Amino acid sequence: MKRILIVEDEGPLLQAIQHKLEDAGFKTIPTRDGKEALASLAGSEPLPDLIWLDYYLPFMNGLEFLTRIKSEERLKRIPVIVVSNTAGSEKVSAMLDLGVDAYFVKAERRLNEIIKKVQSIVNGGAKHE
């Protein structure tokens, strides 16, 4: 079973994402912030097959979290999708430059659409959206 690490601080949204991913056949690892997610990754074997990352998080934003994991040999190959409230061109470019596989604005996509992209990425499909 493919494993997805969810990094989302909004409780109801975290639950909705978790429920939809589990309905799609994924095992989920829910976390509420970047520190909790890093702690989860530190002891995780096997590593998750994908990280679902919010940009605006307590303690460190998505860009800081992404910079941390992409600098670690053990973690840098994990595919990451960012699901955020906004998509300023500089922010999106910075995330894509660090190797994000897809970037979505929450208000523009339904969860089911994003989950289809997750399925495509973990099954070796097309990246960058």
Image (cartoon, rainbow, N blue to C red):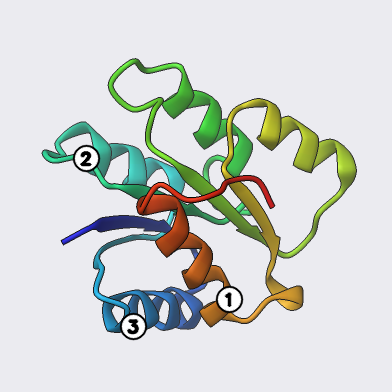
Amino acid type at image mark 2: Leu
Q: Quadrant of the N terminus?
A: bottom left
Q: Where residue 106 sits: x, y (%)?
A: 68, 71
Give how far across and how far down residue 44 sits, in percent: 16, 40
The residue carrying pointer 2 sits among few (fewer than 14), some (14 to 19) or many (20 or more) residues within 10 Å by Cα, namely some
Decide which of 51, 62 is in the foreground and name it.
Answer: 51
Pick the residue in front: 38 or 49.
49
Question: Of helix, strand and loop, which one carries label 1?
Answer: helix
Quarter residue 69 falls in: top left
Could you tell me which residue is drawn at 54 percent across and 51 percent down?
81
| Mark 2 / mark 1, whichever is N-terminal | 2
Q: What is the residue that sits farthest to the left in this orientation?
A: 45
Q: Residue at x 22, y 32 (%)?
A: 42
Report which residue position mark 1 lands on: 113
Identify the amino acid type marked 3.
His
> Residue 47: which disc?
2
Q: CA distance from mark 1 to mark 3?
A: 15 Å
Which badge, 1 or 3, comes first in the chain's sequence? 3
Q: What amino acid type should be assigned to the residue bearing mark 1?
A: Glu
Gap between marks 2 and 1, in whole Å? 24 Å
Residue ID for mark 3: 19
